[in-house]
């Protein structure tokens, strides 16, 4: 039986089916490009290449992302980058901030004013993962202010226009190294931020690093897992972290 012999209703149904299939194919090809959380590799610029920056660079490079590590002495980072892989690049802080849509701040808290001056023009509109912790003994009076206000309130002034997300500040680097992708339930990483797309992207990068993100709330709620809080540097599953923070179960 050919198309001509089909009754009009069946012909209409056939055309509708074909149209829907074409629409589905179109959506499948265009949606990933529109999504802020693309399945493709991200370009991540990390300011700082020490205990935290270096370990995160390795975890994300292993997950297939393109990473740039940076410091005040980028020439000294070449061997570190090469030891991780060909997808790890080296640059200045400004070059790392310009590298891609995600920037990570992994320097001592007292360096915020210097970092701000060097990179703020590059980070407007970008996702900036902030894992810095204020320690007054090390970082001076600005750290006391941040302890009082909470980092989620104190830090955005250094990078106006950036989509700041607090994450990875409450895990010790040895646990970052040792417990990524552990067997059984993953270790939880508390996350706080105001921009939904930046939070979603951060959540994906937490998973790619081998941990489980737990959304705590807006950026100001980062004080719930700041240095000195009851959950700070505790190794917890997502369910345990939610319970300790009084968050609803997932
Ligand atoms: N260590 C932990 O377990 C841990 C856990 C959670 C959060 N944190 C927080 O994470 C941050 C980093 O800690 P860390 O232990 O990774 O420190 P770290 O090992 O001392 O590394 C700091 C890195 O920042 C670079 N750096 C310092 N000032 C800079 C500047 N002005 N511009 C560019 N790069 C600069 C340093 O390189 P150069 O000196 O060569 O520039 C170094 O690569 C701190 O705020 C810390 O409180 C640490």
Image (cartoon, rainbow, N blue to C red):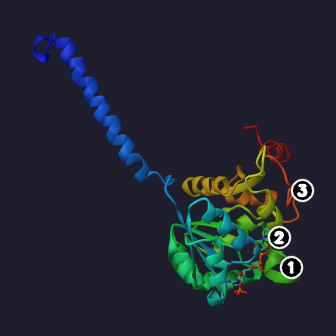
* Callout 1 crowding tier (Cα within 10 Å): few <14, some 14–19, many ≥20: some
Real-space Cα separation, disc 2 to disc 1, in angstroms = 9 Å
Q: Which quadrant holds the C terminus? A: top right
Q: Residue at x 87, y 56 (%)?
A: 234
Ranked by sequence position, the earlier of labels 2 and 3 is: 2
Residue 147 has which mark?
A: 2
> Reading the chain from its start, which is encountered first: label 3 or label 1?
1
In the picture, measured across the screen, residue 122 lies left or right of residue 5, that is right
Residue 189 position in % (x across, y down): 75, 55
- Evaluate whether residue 164 shows in this view: no
The reply to whether residue 155 is visible in this rendering is: yes
Q: Residue furthest left?
A: 4
Q: Ligand 1: which quarter?
A: bottom right
CB-based contact (under 8 Å), mark 3 and mark 1: no
For the image, the number of numbered tags is 3
Residue annotated with mark 3: 230
Towards the viewer: 148 or 192: 192
Please state the horizontal and vertical placement of residue 19, each as a whole percent of the image: 26, 30
Q: Is residue 249 above or below residue 60?
A: above
- Specify which label sits upstream in the sequence, 2 or 1: 1
Quadrant for the N terminus in the image:
top left
> Which residue is painted at 49% across and 56% down in the image?
40
- Residue 136, disc: 1
As helix, strand or loop, the secondary structure at mark 1 comes to helix
């Amino acid at each position: 039986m050919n198309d001509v012999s089909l009754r009009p209703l069946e012909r209409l149904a056939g055309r509708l089916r074909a149209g829907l299939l074409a629409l589905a194919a179109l959506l499948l090809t265009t949606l990933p490009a529109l999504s802020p959380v693309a399945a493709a590799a991200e370009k991540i610029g990390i300011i700082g290449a020490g205990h935290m920056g270096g370990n995160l660079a390795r975890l994300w490079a292993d997950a297939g992302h393109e990473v740039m590590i940076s410091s005040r002495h980028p020439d000294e980072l070449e061997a570190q980058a090469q030891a991780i892989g060909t997808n790890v690049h080296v640059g200045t802080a400004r070059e790392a901030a310009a590298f891609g849509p995600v920037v990570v701040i992994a320097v001592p808290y007292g360096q915020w004013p210097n970092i701000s001056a060097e990179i703020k023009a590059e980070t407007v509109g970008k996702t900036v993962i902030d894992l810095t912790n204020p320690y007054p003994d090390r970082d001076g009076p600005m750290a006391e202010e941040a302890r009082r206000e909470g980092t989620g309130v104190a830090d955005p002034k250094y990078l106006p226009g950036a989509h700041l997300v607090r994450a990875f500040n409450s895990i010790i680097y040895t646990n970052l190294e040792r417990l990524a992708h552990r067997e059984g339930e993953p270790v939880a990483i508390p996350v706080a931020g105001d921009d939904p797309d930046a939070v979603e992207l951060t959540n994906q990068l937490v998973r790619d690093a081998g941990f489980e993100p737990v959304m705590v709330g807006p950026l100001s709620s980062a004080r719930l897992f700041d240095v000195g809080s009851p959950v700070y540097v505790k190794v917890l599953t997502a369910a345990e972290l939610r319970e300790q923070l009084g968050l609803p179960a997932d």
